[in-house]
Amino acid sequence: MNDRIGRLVSFIHRKAMSYHTKCLKGYGISSAEYPVLFQLNRKDGVTQDEIAVELGMDKGAITRILQSLLQKQMVERKKDGTDRRCNRIFLTALGRETKEPVRQAKDSWNNILTKNMTEQEKKELVRLLKRTIQNIQEEL
């Protein structure tokens, strides 16, 4: 495999999408919806903009994902109590049922990524990836 960083990151991303699709297919969750559900399981009642910022995704993409999750009745929008122009996104009962399968898929994928790594290597990988993200945010 070529050692260009972009190609390596792209390869990992494609494999992650495929893996999450396979793991979550039985729950009706797509690989695009997975990160949003994971985020909402961590912190429910956030705004669409907060989801986009936290996940580093385009607002338009988040809109499409939320529309799909609304149609599947996994999330609902509610007006903010203090700012009526703002909508907050909440998991429905059906959406909350995704917490464990989504967590298991995340943990399983992380185990695959770090298989045969020492704890020090895992920490170094996380440190370098965070630095990479910081570089991207500073440039873009």
Image (cartoon, helix red, strand yellow):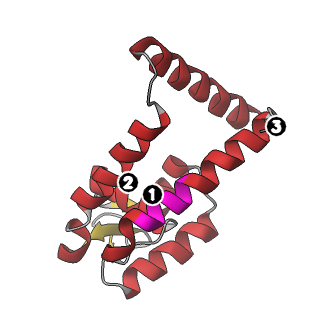
Counting the numbered discs, the total is 3
The question of residue 118 being in magenta is answered with no
Question: Which segment did they paint magenta?
Answer: 16-22
**Of residues 14 and 137, which is closer to you in this image?**
14
Q: Which residue is mark 3?
A: 2
**Of residues 89 and 9, which is closer to you in this image?**
9
Name which residue type carries label 1: Pro
As displayed, is residue 109 above or below residue 73?
Answer: above
Q: Which residue is mark 1?
A: 35
Q: What element does badge 2 sit on?
A: helix
Residue 43 appears anywhere in the view: no
Residue mark closest to the camera, 3 vs 1 = 3
Mark 1 surroundings: few (<14), some (14-19) or many (≥20) residues within 10 A: some
As displayed, is residue 120 above or below residue 18?
Answer: above
| Marks 2 and 1 in Cβ contact (< 8 Å) | yes
Residue 83 appears anywhere in the view: yes
**How far apart are labels 3 and 1 at the CA level?**
28 Å
Name which residue type carries label 2: Gln
User: Which SS does the magenta portion mostly show?
Assistant: helix
| Marks 2 and 3 in Cβ contact (< 8 Å) | no
The image's mark for residue 39 is 2
Q: Residue at x 63, y 24 (%)?
A: 131
Point out residue 11 in the picture as x, y percentages from the top left corner.
68, 48
As displayed, is residue 127 above or below residue 25?
Answer: above
Which corner quadrant holds the N terminus?
top right
Q: What element does badge 1 sit on?
A: helix
For residue 45, which quarter of the picture? bottom left
Point out residue 56 in the picture as x, y percentages from the top left corner.
58, 49
Q: Is residue 115 left or right of residue 74?
A: right
